[in-house]
Image: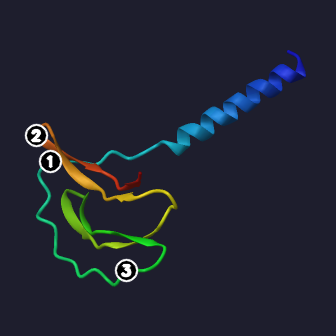
Amino acid sequence: MPKSSIRTLLAAAVFALASGATFAQTVIIAPSAPPPPRVETVPPPRAGYAWDPGHWRYAHGGYVWAPGHWQTVRVGHRWVPGHWIAHGPNWRWMPGHWA
């Protein structure tokens, strides 16, 4: 096999492996609805940051509260907080993301 073909094949393999790792996400499914959100005292706004509100995480067979925190702003984007959605008889966590 010519060296140029080997280099092309190697570059394609590296790209495929790198892009697969970039989009990997853990899917969280819970058997019951999360409790109502807790009331949080949001700290005063900070320049260059967006508030990510607290939410219930599902771990080890139960819900655990994850308090809100500041996210560094991505210029030209807005923060979409994570949320739970009904998925058949279960509930699925949709992680927060920049849009």
Tell me if mark 3 has few (under 14), some (14-19) or many (20+) residues whose alpha carbon lies within 10 angstroms of its own: few
Give the SS element for disc 2.
Answer: loop
Q: Earlier in the sequence, mark 2 or mark 1?
A: 1
- Position of residue 74 in the picture relative to residue 67 (left or right): right
Q: Where 69 falls versus 7 (above or below)?
A: below
Outermost front residue? 76
Q: Earlier in the sequence, mark 3 or mark 2?
A: 3
User: Mark 2 near mark 1, Cβ–Cβ under 8 Å?
Assistant: yes
Label 2 sits on residue: 89
Residue 15 image point, x, y percent: 66, 35
Label 1 to label 3: alpha-carbon separation: 36 Å
Outermost top residue? 1
State the mark number for residue 9. none
Label 3 to label 2: alpha-carbon separation: 38 Å
State the mark number for residue 31. 1
Label 3 sits on residue: 45
Q: Nearer the viewer, residue 83 or 61?
A: 83
The amino acid on which the numbered mark 2 sits, given as a three-letter code, is: Pro
Q: Nearer the viewer, residue 43 or 32?
A: 43
Q: Where 40 falls versus 93 (above or below)?
A: below
Q: Residue at x 61, y 36 (%)?
A: 17
Pair 1/3: label in front:
3
Q: Where 51 falls versus 95 (above or below)?
A: below
Residue 44 image point, x, y percent: 34, 84
Residue 72 image point, x, y percent: 48, 69
Give the SS element for disc 1.
Answer: loop
Q: Residue at x 81, y 23 (%)?
A: 6
Q: Nearer the viewer, residue 41 or 38?
A: 41
Outermost right residue? 3
The amino acid on which the numbered mark 3 sits, given as a three-letter code, is: Pro
Q: Residue at x 82, y 20 (%)?
A: 5
